Image (cartoon, coloured by chain):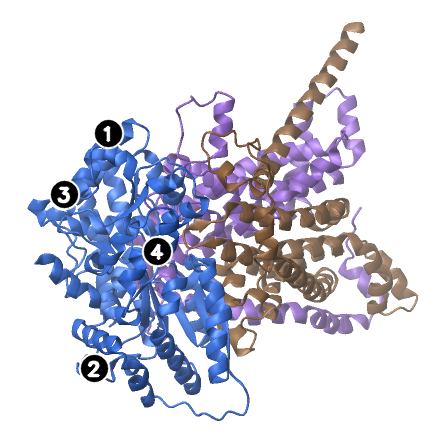
Chain colours: A brown, B purple, C blue
Amino acid sequence: MPVALRSRSSRKIIGRIALYLAVAWFTFYAAFPFVWMLITAFKRNSDLYNVKNNPFLFNQPPTLEHMRLLFEGTPFLRWLWNTGFVGLMVVIITLVAAVPAGYSLARLARAWGRRLGIAIFLTYLVPPTLLFIPLSRVVAELRLQDNLWALVLVYPTFTIPFCTWLMMGFFKSIPGELEEAAMVDGCTRLAALRHIVLPISVAGILTVTIFAFALSMQEFTYALTFISPSSQKTVSIGVPTDLIRGDVFYWGSLMGGALVSAVPAAILYSLFLDRFIAGLTAGALK
Amino acid sequence: MAKIATAESYKVIRRGGITSDRWLGTFMLAPAILYIVLLVAGPLLFAIYLSVSNATTGEYTLEYVGLANFVRALQSSIFRTALANTFIFTIVSQIIVIIFGNMLALALQERFRGRSIVRFLILLPWATPVSLAAIGWKWMYDSLYSVVNWMLKAVHILGPTDFPQWLGFPSLAIPAVISVHVWRTFPFSAVVILAGLTSIPQETLDAASVDGAGFFHRLFYILLPMLLPIITVAVLFGTVFTFTDMGAVYILTAGGPFNSTHVLSSWAFQVGIVAGDLAQGAAVAVFMLPVLLVAAITMLRIASRETGV
Amino acid sequence: MGEHEEAKWIRTADNRWRRVTRREFLKIAAAGAVAGSLWPYINVPSVWAQRRRLTILHWAHFVPGYDDWFDKVYTSQWGRANDVEVVVDHIPFGQVPARAAAEVAARSGHDLYQHISPAATLEPETEDMGDIIERKSTYNPKTKKWFAFSNSWVPDPSHYRKDLFAEAGFEPDSWFSVLEAGRKLKAKGVPVGIGLGNDIDANYVLRDIIWSFGGTTQNQSNEVTINSKNTVEAVKYVRALFKEAMTPEVLAWDASSNNRAMLAGAVSFVFNAISIARTSEKANDHLTRHIQIWVPPRGPQMLGGKRLGAQHVILAYMIWKFTPNDRKALAKKFLVDFINNWGPAFTHAELYEFPSFPGTVPDITQQVLNDPVAARLGQPNKYRPLASTLKWSTNVGHPGFANAAEAEIFDTFIIPQMFAVAATDRMSPEEAVQWAERQMRPVYAKWKGRGLM
């Protein structure tokens, strides 16, 4: 008996150690580049570009010069704002298109619903490298060239397919009886959708929101080829444009820009992570 | 938990509802379908047409040239390298991502001190625009100031005079690119798998635990089989991200050293856009489609069959 | 003299501009006759219902101050004088072709699009610039279309550590002495740094070496000539340089790496635009006074002993065909005015850029010899080698034109790959050169088939 106990508790300790080691390794792997960005962003060039220095120590006092260049020498705040704006608009369009479509595929389309769902999902696979040439014509015809709205128009092409598929799964996980009961009581289907289904779909909608925002923040090819005025750029193209000058990289400011744009988004995502997971659990499994 | 309304149950409720449902269904589906047809399908067909034409970035007087661009692509040794790399990068990085994603998800499921901070830090890679993240990694693998090398020296994995050139030899540059792909995609996979873990009823796990099943037994015989569909979803995403991504390679190595790290999308961009042979570039990019199609359909099948829908 | 011949050719070769035309033009420009004489042939209606707009796309310049001056001072002055609102947008140099492709596909874009290379593939969609160059010249450039207008280009000199080379007892005046010095300096931990990776600097300097050894990538009739004894010798030379005077880091280099390595004191000899010297002056540390600019080294005497360097960046403006006529005219007026007042641009570009029409900067030699920053830091002669840059600079594709096939070979890094596979013993020098020829021939055939060459 005591032997078994000891082995159980020692097993528990080993398990705990393994847990902490695993967490430590993954956190290190994920976050180390940001630590390095943070150090780079505040180091003097003469300290940074000295091979003999310990890269983790501030051998000379830290400097705000790189951050000053980032915030005062470039319209960085404007780019952050643009990124947020495009993300938000893309989320709205995505929701307007994907939520009804997902519901339709889950409940109304029936026989061909799944096949159509897969077909819609597959359009997500078409790489931007292939699409930006034809799309640039579309953007020009709509007179949206060099305008943030070009991105608002184009980004849903890759958010809608996935989000529709996800919402379809999510709606399938909600028991149909809920609406049926309401409809027997005389509700129309749309009213049932609005008053019964949507309120319990918050997690799914949130998942789609975060996913659409994250994807639109990541995008590079379209932003690069459709937008050239500095005032209309997003973070993902503004930072590399203004801080790589011919063959000179402004490493401190570049790393600062990457860090400052990643942190708020990561905070946002981690706040909603539980909801996101709940949404995925229901949505991706069906 | 989820019970799907069958066709019968609709009929029982409203006899006349089916036709109106059909209209409603079409109506609700219309915005998404319209968007996709107009802005994806149309341009995609045009892009495919480019691949069998002789278009250049400066000339769109399209002439049909059949499969000439595909033949020429296949004749190039750089293209063949790029094709192989695309598979190598995707498969290797996704195998690592499955392992890491599972381990991390299992760890995050536990309660421990600092869990919320860890969750925040883990999400950082996913929150960084890929163009900026790749520049960050480029800086870490720098030929002169590589902090990776500095750390490896500090823990004596490298000798004091060693300084491996991560982006200078294919044998190191390929792992370097893969490390970035893994870094970008494993946090998302972990979150997806975590979602799958939370859906496994606690009773199932408790029952297994009471039976005295060890951790690994539980992992391989209970958890993983139940997680298979969601892992497939995670892998599907990782595959799409990695297979079509150009940024990591383009920013990190520009395809070098000696064009040994190109992937299809970076090579398509280099030939089709930078060098101006649009038709050739489109042909290279079109090579990605059948592979993605097969992979996606297979994985979606697995994902849905396993859940019994 | 060989060098003189080169000089004449060099002045004319970029952007397909014929030698005579260019020279004629230089004379006119130098005489100050351009301003009045070129313009009257392009009419811009002077009364407009609303304020006109002119949009210009530029790369993000090496010198942030240049962009400030161009965006905020020059264009706004010009705009006020002509009642035009001028808008200048910037994109990074690596992305210039992608945006151009998108504008052509969209059939809409900037009125003036600035490339950093001649971008010959875009020719069918560009406006002929002949009218703003050719009018007053007596030469008729046959049917050659002038698809772009280059106002300036960037020399690509060598940078070396004067102190270290002096210690080793060498001047980097020939590639042979670079190798000799490099052997000694590598032992001291400061090797030579000639990039062998997929990067633009490697693409230029490796061509310099081929030319200095008497080889060429193509001839004047657009035929592939890479497979020659001379190229093999050049490849052998670089293999020796790689093994004896360099470290493997050059395989991993991008365009910015040689800057950092030189500034860190980690290498003793590199090739680049003058950004290294300029950055070093800003830091003004113990290395600044040891970093010296130098002309490209000579090749071996027995192979002709040539001294040639590639034009690093050729800034070339294009006007799209699909741009409305009134804006085309406005854009051309802007270019003519700009080139006639290019003097301040030269100064603001801090010697990075040299004029395609030297007459536009009459005191160019004086400015090069009296660079204020170099003088202040006690190195008045630092930029002297640039004074002769016209003599030793030539275009990619030399002795032929910078055509579409050369551009594709350049953009797909075939030449660096050829050198790198030989340097790392993956192929023998002969095999590497044959491999490069096999890659190049179909590209030439393809572009000839498309009627661009």
Q: Are marks 1 and 2 in contact (CB under 8 Å)?
A: no
- Three-letter amino acid code of the residue under disc 3: Glu
Disc 3 from disc 2: Cα separation? 42 Å
Where is mark 2, residue-wise? Answer: C137
Q: Is residue C358 left or right of residue C52?
A: left
**Chain under label 2?**
C
Q: Please give the name of the residue rendered at 74% of the width and 34% of the height, measured from the top-left corner.
A: B115
Q: Nearer the viewer, residue B165 or C180?
A: C180
Mark pair 2, 4: CA separation: 34 Å
Which residue in the protein does label 4 denote?
C371
Residue that carries the numbered disc 3 in the rendered image: C233
The answer, for residue C253, to whether it is visible in the render is no
Q: Label 2 is placed on what type of residue?
A: Ser
Q: Is residue C218 above or below residue C46?
A: above
What subunit carries mark 1? Answer: C
Chain name for mark 4: C
Q: Is residue A247 above or below residue C20?
A: above
